Image (tube, grey):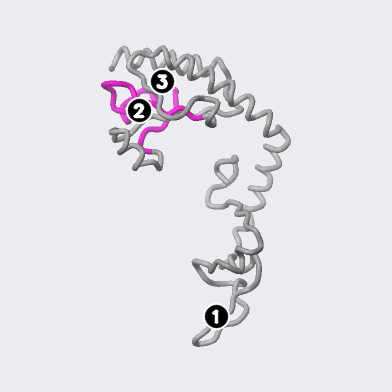
């Protein structure tokens, strides 16, 4: 949900019917159980088999609102804008001395640019940028094995989405460059 401007802790899982019968639930409780005996449990059928406990009713309602909101804007429109932002960011970041962009070319990814700057600690850089009104993330971004393979402990990640503008990308890169020159 939080990837769609909805609440955290809730999401959507789509499964083909055959998997409902093949898979066992990883937790139990609530209406997911049809019958319990001392030595046997019979689960409900279909999706109900995986709904343990009280459903997160309010977060699910809010998630639907978030999905409706993005659908109204238009997913294709969002993707096109995000691609333009990403392409612009890649072009500008390529001119920053000592900056290495990690990952694929812009046309092969979403609105995220992961990078390192030679001689700068990603955590320090994120704090310095934050002090100037730029929010990026630093860390291993749930990709610790990849960072290990790349021979780096952490990286920076700037994310762009439909609410960002080309001017904001330019301001970000200018701020990044000034920070690199001052502290790098």
Please tell me which residue is depicted at 52% across the width and 31% down the height of the picture. 109
Is residue 5 magenta-colored?
no
Question: From what the image shows, is residue 24 above or below residue 94?
Answer: below
Q: Observer-nearest residue: 17 or 32?
A: 17
Q: Nearer the observer, disc 3 or disc 1?
A: 1
Q: Secondary structure at mark 1?
A: strand
Answer with left or right where residue 137 lies relative to residue 64. Answer: left
Q: Marks 1 and 3: in contact by CB < 8 Å?
A: no
Residue neighbourhood size for the residue with mark 3, other residues' Cα within 10 Å, grouped as few (<14), some (14–19), many (≥20): few
Horizontal side, residue 61 vs residue 151: left or right: right
Q: Which residue is mark 2?
A: 127
Vertical order, 54 against 162 (above or below): below
Residue for point 41% across, 20% down: 132
Do the CB atoms of the residues marked 1 and 2 lie less than 8 Å apart?
no
Q: Position of residue 55 (x, y in %)?
A: 61, 62
Outermost residue to the bottom:
38
Q: Which residue is disc 3 drawn over?
A: 132
Dot 3 lies on which element?
loop
The part of the chain drawn in magenta is 112-140
Which residue has dot 1 on it?
Answer: 41
């Amino acid at each position: 949900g939080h990837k769609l401007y909805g609440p955290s802790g809730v999401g959507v899982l789509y499964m083909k019917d055959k998997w409902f019968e093949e898979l066992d639930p990883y937790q139990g409780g609530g209406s997911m159980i049809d019958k319990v005996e001392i030595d046997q449990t019979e689960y409900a059928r279909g999706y109900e088999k995986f709904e343990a406990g009280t459903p997160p009713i309010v977060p699910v309602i809010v998630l639907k609102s978030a999905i409706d909101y993005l659908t109204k804007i238009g997913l294709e429109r969002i993707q096109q804008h995000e691609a333009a932002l990403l392409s612009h960011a890649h072009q500008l970041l390529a001119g920053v001395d000592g900056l290495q962009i990690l990952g694929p070319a812009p046309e092969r990814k979403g609105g995220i640019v992961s990078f390192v700057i030679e001689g700068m600690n990603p955590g320090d850089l994120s704090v310095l940028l934050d002090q100037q009104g730029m929010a990026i993330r630093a860390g291993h971004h749930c990709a610790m094995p990849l960072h290990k393979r790349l021979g780096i402990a952490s990286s920076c990640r700037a994310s762009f989405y439909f609410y960002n503008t080309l001017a904001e990308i330019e301001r970000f890169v200018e701020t990044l460059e000034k920070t690199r020159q001052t502290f790098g």
